[in-house]
Amino acid sequence: MGDVIDLSGDGGVLKQIVRRAKPDAIAPSDDLPVVDVHYEGILAEDGKVFDTSREDNLVFSFELGSGSVIRSWDIALKTMKVGEVAKITCKSEYAYGRAGSPPDIPPDATLIFEVELVACRPRKGASVGSVSEERARLEDLKKQREIAAASKEDDKKKREEAKAAAAARIQAKLDAKKGQGKGKGKGKSK
């Protein structure tokens, strides 16, 4: 078994890798938030198994971060890769707390889970491709908006330069007329 890793920073959620995933294994992500797991839950106090998915050989599926499982699972599963098996020790404040979950889990119980991450997948109705494509489409849209904004700025700058040039030409003509008018006036008074 691997070293014990404190995932919560306060000793509330500890992870020990029992079996490492393959190096190229995928992990849960924003694109793949739904996980399928096999697990066995044990009471730390007496070693009694209180729940397991292995008896029926059915995976348990849930979406990370949706609040559908105990907090320690959200924390721990985010750090795992498909194929990995880990022993997760959860203090009560990261599990069922003071209330417990009668009749199987007493109040303030520390729990130990052996969890295998079987798969990660997109939310129902989404596919990895569609999520990635949507992200790419939004990025393209953002770039197009930035280009359009920059183009508007350039156009505005050109208009201001054209106005300034026109004003300078008009001023030059006025100055030239003033200069001619003074010369004519001087010539006539002689």
Image: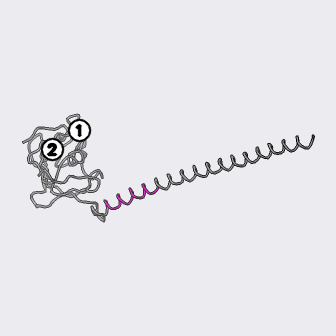
Q: Could you tell which of marks 1 and 2 lies nearer the N-terminus?
A: 1
In the picture as drawn, the residue positioned furthest to the front comes out as: 190
Q: Which quadrant of the rendered structure holds the N terminus?
A: top left
Badge 2 density bin: few <14, some 14–19, many ≥20, Cα 10 Å: many
Q: Quadrant of residue 184?
A: top right
Residue at (23%, 45%) from the top-left corner? 75
Q: Which quadrant of the rendered structure holds the C terminus?
A: top right
State the image coordinates of residue 159 (x, y, percent, origin top left): 61, 52
State the image coordinates of residue 28 (x, y, percent, origin top left): 23, 52
- Say whether residue 108 is visible: no
Residue 88: image tag: 2
Residue at (10%, 57%) from the top-left corner? 54
Q: How many marks?
A: 2
Q: Quadrant of residue 176?
A: top right
In the displayed structure image, the side of residue 138 where residue 86 appears, left or right: left
Q: Per the image, is 163 magenta? A: no
- SS of the residue at dot 1? loop
Q: Where 190 falls versus 136 (above or below)?
A: above
The span shown in magenta is 132-145
What amino acid is at disc 2? Ile
Q: Quadrant of residue 35?
A: bottom left
- SS of the residue at dot 2? strand
Q: Per the image, is 133 magenta? A: yes
Residue at (68%, 46%) from the top-left corner? 168
Residue 175: image tag: none
In the picture as drawn, the residue positioned furthest to the top comes out as: 10
Contact between labelled residues 2 and 1, with CB atoms less than 8 Å apart: no
What amino acid is at disc 1? Ser
Q: Which residue is mark 1?
A: 8
In the picture as drawn, the residue positioned furthest to the right comes out as: 190
